[in-house]
Image (tube, rainbow, N blue to C red):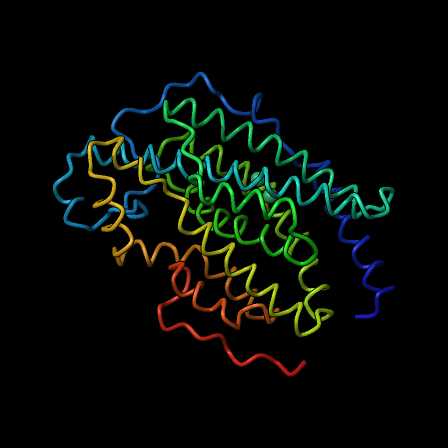
Amino acid sequence: MPVASGIKDRELTAERLLAASAKNSFDPLKDIDWDAPLLPDTYFINEKRCTLYGTRTWARMSPAQRVDLTRHEVASTASVGIWFEVILMQLLIRHAYDQDMTSRHIQYAFTEIADECRHSTMFGRMIEKFEAPNYGPGRYAHELGRAMKTIGFGIQTFAAALIAEEILDSAQREMMQDETIQPLVRDVSRIHVIEEARHVRYAREEVVRRSPRLNRAELEFSRLVIARSAHVIAHHLIHPNVYAAVGLDPKLARREALANPYRDETMRAWARRLVAFFEETNLMGGPGLLLWRRSGLVPRDYRPPVAPAR
Ligand SMILES: [Fe+2]
Ligand SMILES: [Fe+2]
């Protein structure tokens, strides 16, 4: 795509996204009833999506313990969501720093950052309401995130955004429609899905514009950074302390969760759209494939389809 038409096209997309944001945005502090009590004996995420569902430990757990584990797992995922949104906000601010601040493209970047500020506040409130700790991704991922938000640039910004946004989006689309889970989780998911659909479009189009312009070295480096980001995010959504919080041995439970075929199925289902997009944009390949296979987001014997000639 010629650069001039790429920029025009980018401005048109941003214009549409700004109009959609003006029409349909939320203030979670006002739009969610934070005083409504949580429902008793009600899962926080569908039990089939719990990391231990179907395992031997799950069979031994009491119904109350199972519900409690879903409470902690949703809290852990939300805290990792905040961690990731903070990284993304900094990546977007750094992206804006070098661009024309009067462009629609950058005005939409500012709008997205504002959305993320509200989302992180919303997730924080939800964790507080669940009386759960701020699990976060753990120290190692926290430090990798510090490096990413400080030096990540270009296509990496938008591809990394998509990894977290698409996985969470697939999970939350299920949650917002699930009548069997806590209404608060449904409400939070609905707001996030509506606003994130715009972020996904913004990031996808930027990846489509940028990927054909990468030279061989940039392509290989970007593939590796993207694979590493996917691996870190997938492995740290659930903090091992969620198991300790419900009286289980965290090391044993985590091992069981990582070997759980139901868990594999969940992760692959949530990553399907993301992986298909990275295949289309030639971003699956090289040594990073090993990390993808280990992430649980693709089958262990995964191979990308043959890339189109460049
Ligand atoms: Fe968000
Ligand atoms: Fe987002």
Left or right: 167 in relation to 115: left
Relative image position of residue 74 (x, y in whole percent)? 38, 37
Q: Residue furthest top?
A: 35
Count of numbered badges drawn on the protein: 0
Residue appearing at x 46%, y 49% in the figure:
233
Q: Quadrant of residue 210?
A: bottom right
Q: Which quadrant of the render holds ligand 1?
A: top right
Q: Residue furthest left?
A: 60
Residue appearing at x 12%, y 41% in the figure:
60
| Vertical comparison of 283 with 196: above or below | below
Left or right: 242 in relation to 248: right
Relative image position of residue 167 (x, y in whole percent)? 48, 51
Nearest the viewer among 185 and 271 is 271
Residue appearing at x 68%, y 64% in the figure:
208
Residue appearing at x 53%, y 69% in the figure:
284
Left or right: 23 in relation to 245: right
Nearest the viewer among 32 and 141 is 141
Quadrant location of the C terminus in the rendered image? bottom right
Relative image position of residue 271 (x, y in whole percent)? 46, 58
Quadrant location of the N terminus in the rendered image? bottom right
Nearest the viewer among 13 and 77 is 77
Relative image position of residue 125 (x, y in whole percent)? 48, 24
Nearest the viewer among 80 and 183 is 80
Q: Quadrant of residue 177?
A: top left
